[in-house]
Image (spheres, helix red, strand yellow):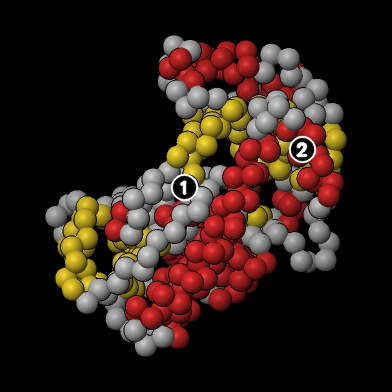
Amino acid sequence: MNRIAVIGAGPGGLTCARILQRHGIDVAVYDSDASATARDQGGTLDMHPDTGQHALRAGGLWPGFTALARPEGEQMRLVTRDGRIAFDAAPSQDGQGNPEIDRGQLRDLLLGSLAPGTVRWGHKLERAEPLGDGRHRLHFTHGRSTETDLVVGADGAWSRVRRMLTGAVPIYTGVTFVETGLNDADTRHPSLAALTGNGTMMALDNNLGFIAQRNSGGHIRVYVGMRTPQDWHRQAGLDLTDPAAVRDALLHRFADWSPALRGFITDTDTGYTNRPLFALPVPHTWEPVPGVTLLGDAAHLMSPFSGMGANLAMRDGADLAQALTEHVTVDDAVIAYEKILIPRSVAAAEGAAEGIDGAFAPDSAEQTLAHMTAH
């Protein structure tokens, strides 16, 4: 098998590289970040048996994962807007659940499993020049280039590789999260920590909501959600760099919610980060192009209400790597992989779109409770 270039060092791209290396296939990963620590990797993930867990086992990383995972983080709690706990699901006790792990810990596990020098940091893809027979010369913004037999677009929501296959671009979902967080929560914010529990707490009602997630190290990551125009802050004349102004604007939106929940706004240790949520159109499909394919958000960006983003990316990476080990030519491998990838992605994206529409709706409290109790 010939040289593979993975663009993007997220969970999906790193999973693909790990499994390829286990089979002796030459692979390099190119990422635009200056280093592995250049950006915060985000919150916590629950690893599902048929996707994320499958990929970890295929990569020989299951023991390392279990040493880091937090099974107690599976707890799911629903809270009403007046601060009452309406639903509380304990983690599975049979070992068959979806244990949580911080995104940063998962990425470090994957990076540590690769041969030294596999990831080339500071390599932002500028363009891919076709050379014929499916081969491409990759040009990076700092002037370097390399040739490859397969370009794997694992470069996320705003993928440059996607442009080689499809003209689709992410669309605003109508929902924005404002991210904030609590440090040393059990000691410094005991009432909010108790309300959150050990896993994820959601309070959703009438197009608004709070989602609080336990991370390791005593941190709770909080998302204050709103169905709102993407430029809500500009319409309000709000400067997003002014924490006091953002706080006051959010408190105004949640004026009739419980003071206990409003504490997730006022007691921040991390400030406020505006995060509009985007998704690719559904269905997102393409015709095969020699020497190019996609995985993860580049292929199927969807709202976080699928609960499947990173899990699917890792399964994508595992399935692509497996196909490359089983087929004689790159083109045959990619065709076989995309026959699995695309239908699975479409089904998951449809579910994610339904999920976010139900979570941020006038009757979202009733919808979410009915969904949880049905499962």
Dot 2 corresponds to which residue? 367
Query: Are circles 1 and 2 on residues that touch, CB within 8 Å?
Result: no
Judge by depth and name the residue closer to the eye, 122 or 211.
Answer: 211
Is 4 located above or below residue 201 in the figure?
Answer: below
Q: Of the residues shown, which amino acid type is indicated by label 2? A: Gln
Classify 10 Å Cα crowding around label 1: few (below 14), some (14-19), many (20 and above).
many
Q: Residue at x 45, y 70 (%)?
A: 338
Sooner in the amino-acid sequence: mark 1 or mark 2: 1
| Residue at the extreme left of the image, as rendered | 143
Q: Of the residues shown, which amino acid type is indicated by label 1? A: Leu
Q: Position of residue 244 (x, y in %)?
A: 52, 14
Q: Residue at x 72, y 50 (%)?
A: 73
Res. 155 visible in picture: yes
Classify 10 Å Cα crowding around label 2: few (below 14), some (14-19), many (20 and above).
some
Q: Where is residue 82 in the image (x, y as percent from the top left)?
A: 81, 22
**Disc marking residue 280:** 1
Judge by depth and name the residue closer to the eye, 30 or 160.
Answer: 160
Q: Where is residue 181 in the image (x, y as percent from the top left)?
A: 59, 33
**Disc marking residue 208:** none
Is 92 located above or below residue 367 in the figure?
Answer: below
